[in-house]
Image: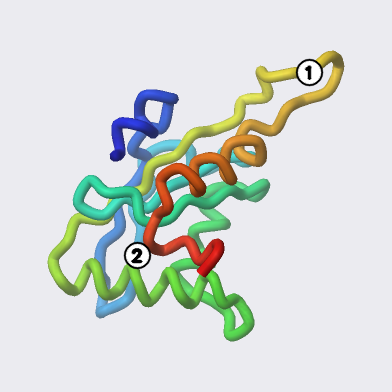
């Protein structure tokens, strides 16, 4: 299923690992990109699709160290810990919006425009939409 995402331009930009039983992320590309669509991929299977207007590095911090009120971050932190503790490979893929798409004079946010369709089509296990 990851080929459906790589075919439209998603690239591997990082990898998750455990550090003292806590999920940590090594980002090797797109850390400072904003307006980005991202995907947690476990052993080649997309598990979570998200988007952010923040820098990717800042958004991923929320999954590493979720605040008490951040239910999505808490849920995904737990899922990351479980997958990693089972020895599964967890990668981060991303599709940045470099501001090239326009409708007339208006910028078309690629991440905002694609997220719902991708989640609906792939139905990643960690997305809580419709559950």
Sequence order check: which comes first, mark 1 or mark 2? 2
Residue at (43% x, 25% y) in the render: 8
Quadrant of the snapshot with the N terminus: top left
Contact, CB < 8 Å: mark 1 with mark 2? no
Question: What residue is pinned by disc 1?
Answer: 103
Q: Is residue 131 left or right of residue 113?
A: left
Question: Colour mode?
Answer: rainbow
| Disc 1 packing (10 Å; few <14; some 14–19; many ≥20) | few
Q: Nearer the viewer, residue 72 or 32?
A: 72
In the image, what residue occupies the spot 67% across and 46% down?
A: 53
Q: Quadrant of residue 35?
A: top right
Q: Which disc is residue 24 wearing?
A: 2
Up the image or down, 38 lies above or below 125; here it is above
Is 108 left or right of 76, judged from the image as shown?
Answer: right
Classify 24 as above or below 10: below
Measured in 3D between alpha carbons, the distance from the residue under mark 1 to the one under mark 2, in whole angstroms, is 38 Å
1 vs 2, front mark: 1
The residue drawn where x is 34% and y is 64% is 24
Q: Position of residue 25 (x, y in %)?
A: 36, 58
Secondary element at tag 1:
strand
Residue 5 placement (x, y as % from top left): 39, 33
Left or right of 4 on screen, residue 115: right
């Amino acid at each position: 299923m990851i080929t459906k995402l790589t075919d439209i331009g998603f690239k591997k930009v990082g990898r998750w690992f455990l550090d003292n039983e806590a999920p940590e992320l090594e980002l090797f590309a797109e850390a400072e990109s904003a307006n980005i669509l991202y995907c947690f991929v476990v052993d080649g299977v997309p598990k979570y699709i998200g988007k952010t207007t923040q820098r990717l590095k800042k958004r991923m911090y929320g999954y590493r160290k979720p605040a008490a009120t951040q239910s999505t971050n808490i849920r995904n932190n737990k899922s990351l810990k479980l997958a990693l503790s089972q020895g599964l490979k967890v990668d981060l893929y991303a599709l940045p919006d470099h501001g090239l798409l326009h409708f007339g004079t208006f910028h078309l946010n690629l991440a905002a425009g694609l997220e719902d369709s991708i989640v609906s089509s792939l139905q990643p296990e960690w997305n809580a939409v419709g559950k």
